[in-house]
Image (spheres, rainbow, N blue to C red):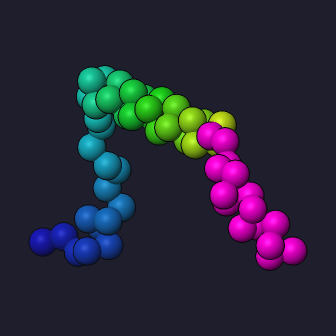
Amino acid sequence: MSSDRETSKKAPPQRSAKARGGDQEMGQALRSVYQQTIDEQIPPEMLDLLGKLE
């Protein structure tokens, strides 16, 4: 019989190369969306509203 401590010390199972490749694709997609968001222009209406707060 093994305890919970012994079970929690086991290394996670190795992932296949295909799974790791999917992670890389997902990471690239997320970086792309993030960069598009950063590059997006702020609408003039929003800038007007922000200017009124100052």
Q: Where's the N terminus, which quadrant?
A: bottom left
| Any part of residue 22 in sight | yes
| Any part of residue 31 in sight | no
Q: Which x, y percent locates residue 15?
A: 29, 35
Q: Identify the image quadrant of residue 35.
A: top right
Figure disc tally: 0
Q: Is residue 46 above or below residue 41?
A: below
The residue sitting at 74% across, 58% down in the picture is 47
Is 36 on the left or on the right of 21, as rendered? right
**Seen from this angle, which residue lies furthest left?**
1
Q: Is residue 4 above or below residue 8?
A: below
**Seen from this angle, which residue lies furthest right?**
54
Q: Where's the C terminus, which quadrant?
A: bottom right
* Magenta region, residue range: 40-54
The residue sitting at 58% across, 43% down in the picture is 37
As rendered, which of 3 and 28 lies closer to the eye?
28
As rendered, which of 43 and 34 lies closer to the eye?
43
Q: Is residue 5 above or below residue 48?
A: below
Q: Identify the image quadrant of residue 23.
A: top left
- Check residue 44 for magenta coloring: yes
The residue sitting at 34% across, 50% down in the picture is 11
As rendered, which of 47 and 35 lies closer to the eye?
47
Q: Main secondary structure of the magenta part?
A: helix
- Check residue 51 for magenta coloring: yes
Q: Which x, y percent locates residue 4?
A: 25, 74
Is 33 on the left or on the right of 15, as rendered? right
Q: Which x, y percent locates residue 24?
A: 42, 29
Q: Is residue 44 above or below residue 19?
A: below
Is 37 on the left or on the right of 23, as rendered? right
